[in-house]
Image (cartoon, grey):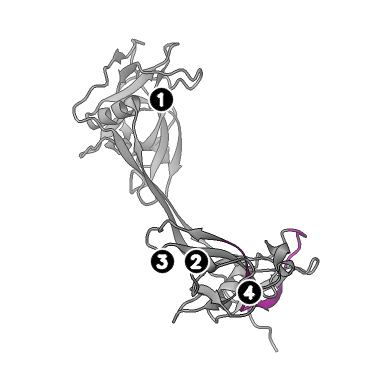
Amino acid sequence: MTAASPPEVLRAPLVVEFPFTRSLGPVQSAFLTGLRERVVLGVKTADGRVVVPPTEYDPVTSEEVRDLVEVAATGTVTTWAWNDRPRPNQPLGTPFAWVLVKLDGADTALLHALDAPGPDAVRTGMRVRVRWAAERTGAITDIACFEPSDDAAPASEAAPAAHDGVFRDAVTGIVAEARLDYVYSPGRAQTAYINALSERRTVGERCPSCHKVYVPPRGACPTCGVATTDQVEVGPAGTVTTFCIVNIKAKNLDIEVPYVYAHIALDGAGLALHGRIGGIPYDQVRMGLRVEPVWTEGGRYPDHYRPTGEPDADYDAYKELI
C-alpha cells in the first residue's frame, strides 16, 4: 500500500491597491508643471547645492528651501542596474536599465529608466538625455525615459539659471496609484484549513507541547516554536469573546451599517477567530453570546454567525481567549 500524496498547496494571484490623492506644495507643483512644459527644475539650498528632484526642505539642515533653478535635460549616469523583465506599468515594456542620472547643473541624481539595447551598452559615466513623453500631464512620467546622448559633459561649471516656478494652469495635486501585484501561498496548514471550509468544516492544528488548538492553523506553535501537524475539527458553534459595532460602510461591501464584527472562540479552539454577527439586532450582541455559522449556497466560508439560542457562556469559560 502506498501512502496518499499530500494535497497541493494553494496559490493565488493577489493585488493590493491604495490610490490616494495628494496635494502639492509650491515646489512640487512647480517641478511637475515644469515637466509638462519640458523644463526640469531643482532647488538651491543655502550652501549652493542644487537638489533634483526638488525637495521642500534641505535634506541636510532641514531648512525650508524655495529657490528654484532650471537644470539641463542632459546628464551623466552615476550608477545603474539592468532590468531584463519589465513589470506592468513600468516605464518601458522592453528590457531597460534603472539609472541614477545627475543632470547638468544638479548636485544630486534622479532615478529613471534608460532605453538601451542591452547591459553592454550601459556604463557609469555615460552621457544621457531626457526623452520627453508625447503627451504630458504634469507627472514624473512626462519623462518617458532617458536615452544615450553623444553630447559631451559641459565644460563650464556655470550656476543654473534661477526660475520663478510660474506656469499657466499649474498642477496642484496628483493621484498616487500605489499597487502591489503578487502571488500568495497560504502554506500547508492553511491550505488544509481552507479546503476544510469548502466542506463546511473548521479544522485547526494542536500543538504537541502546550496542546493549544490554533484556528486558523499556522503550521507551528508561536509560543512553543514547534511544528503542528495534528489536525483537530472544532466548532461549529462558538462564543463571542469581544466585538465592535461598525458604523462606516466599506466600499464594495454589501452590508448595511451598523453591523457587528466579533472575535468568536469556536468550541475546542485555543484562540478566537473573527466573523460578522447577524440574525440579531446589533445592540443586543454581547460577550458570551453563543453563535453558529451560516453558510450561503456555494460559499467557501461562513457568511456570518447567528445566535444558537443557547444560554450565554459563563465568563470564566472564555476569559482566557479574550
Q: Position of residue 212 (x, y in %)?
A: 74, 68
Q: Mark 3: few, some, or many residues within 10 Å (few <14, many ≥20)?
A: few
Instruction: Read off the residue under disc 4.
Output: 238
Point out the tag, 3 or 4, that comes first from the N-terminus.
4
Percent across and percent down for residue 199 are: 55, 82
| 238 inside magenta stretch | yes
Q: Regarding mark 4 in the picture, which secondary structure is present there?
A: strand
Which numbered disc covers residue 282?
2
Please report whichever mark, 1 or 2, sits nearer to the chain's N-terminal start.
Answer: 1
Closer to viewer: mark 3 or mark 2: 2
The quarter of the picture where the N terminus appears is bottom right
Mark with earlier residue (3, 2): 3
Q: Residues within 10 Å of mark 2 (few under 14, many from 20)?
A: some
Tell me where residue 88 appears, x and y as whole percent: 36, 52
Q: Quadrant of residue 152?
A: top left
Q: Amino acid at mark 3?
A: Ile
Residue displayed at 65% across by 68% down: 217
Dot 1 corresponds to which residue?
55
